[in-house]
Every structure is written in C-alpha cells, then in structure tokens.
Amino acid sequence: AFAKFDLALSVGDSAEHFRCIVEYATALFDRGTVERYLGYLQAILRGMVADGQTVVNHIPLLSEAERRQLTEV
C-alpha cells in the first residue's frame, strides 16, 4: 500500500486514551525516524498535561541519550 501523503498523523480519542495512526512514505522515512518524531510529539503532550501554562517551545523534546549524543559531537 502507498501512503497518500509523505507523512500523515491521524488521532482519535476514547474515554481513556488517544489513538494515533501514522502513515508515511517509506521511500522518504524509515521506521526509526517516524518513531523518533512520535517521541517528540509525546514529549510535547506530556509537557502540556504536566503544566497547562507551559509555553510549547520551552518543553524539551530530546531524550537524555539524544542530548548526550549531540553534545559529544
């Protein structure tokens, strides 16, 4: 099956949780990249839930391992 868009995220909700479905063009993205993007989205959502007054660009996206990797370069 081919993705209709390069990268698409569909979100649905129920009483207890959200369900996300990601479709992506495998010629453009690999699974690890898409999973990393979803991790960033998850970090944003967790930051917003933790403090509704938080400015989105103040929420850290990178994991500790990613930060360490970037600072070692």
Image: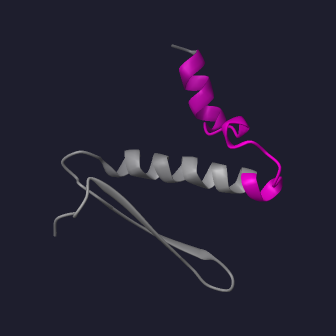
Above or below residue 15? Residue 12 is above
Q: Is residue 53 magenta?
A: yes
Left or right? Give the position of 11 relative to 65: left
Which sits in the foreground, 57 or 2? 57
Above or below residue 13? Residue 43 is above
Left or right? Give the position of 20 relative to 26: right
Residue 16 image offset from top left, x and y in percent:
69, 82
Instruction: Please tell me which residue is depicted at 70% across the width and 40% down the height of the picture.
Output: 59
Scheme of colours in the image: one colour
Give the position of the N terminus as an image quadrant. Answer: bottom left
Instruction: Please tell me which residue is depicted at 63% across the width and 38% down the height of the picture.
Output: 63
Report the label total: 0
Left or right? Give the position of 32 relative to 12: left
Residue 69 image offset from top left, x and y in percent:
55, 24
Which sits in the foreground, 54 or 40? 54
In the image, the segment drawn in magenta is: 48-71
Instruction: Please tell me which residue is depicted at 81% across the width and 55% down the height of the picture.
Output: 52
Residue 61: image quadrant is top right
